[in-house]
Image (spheres, rainbow, N blue to C red):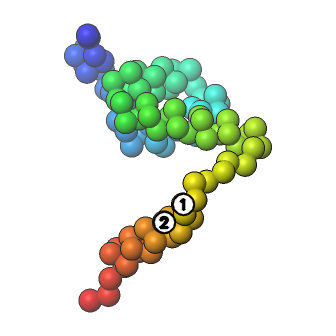
Amino acid sequence: MARAEDFGQEVMNCRELLEQLNQYVDGDIDPALCEEIERHLADCDPCQVMVDTLRKTITIYKNGRPLELPPGFHKRLHQTLRAHWKQTHRTP
């Protein structure tokens, strides 16, 4: 498959996609930039997953349905966050 970089075109990277993500998902973006994002998504599975997940999250939020979390989820989430905080904010 021919890729943009094969023809000397600059290819959008993941960081650049993230900078434009909100406008892209909202549909409030220049058509040329939209095409760049879609080219990037065609070759980047992690970004595809992120965009799909964001769209699903927005859809769930707009539907206004509360989601039932599995039993113990809240407690496990807090334990994980606390552990991560301790690892990343250690004092010398």
Q: Which residue lies furthest to the bottom in this view?
A: 92
Residue nearer the viewer, 1 or 60? 60
The quadrant of the rendering that contains the N terminus is top left
Q: Disc 2 marks which amino acid?
A: Arg
Above-or-below relation of 30 to 75:
above
How many callouts does the rendering have? 2
Residue located at (61% from left, 41% from top): 57
Picture quarter containing residue 81?
Answer: bottom left
* Residue at disc 1, secondary structure: helix
Specify whether residue 81 is in view.
no
Q: Badge 2 is on which residue? A: 76
* Residue at disc 2, secondary structure: helix
The answer to whether residue 44 is left or right of residue 75 is: left
Q: Rounded to the nearest whole Å, what is the CA distance between mark 2 and mark 1?
A: 5 Å
Q: Are marks 2 and 1 in contact (CB under 8 Å)?
A: yes
Residue nearer the viewer, 32 or 47? 47
Q: Disc 1 marks which amino acid?
A: Phe
Picture quarter containing residue 26?
Answer: top right
Q: Which mark is residue 73?
A: 1
Specify whether residue 77 is in view.
yes
Residue located at (22% from left, 16% from top): 6
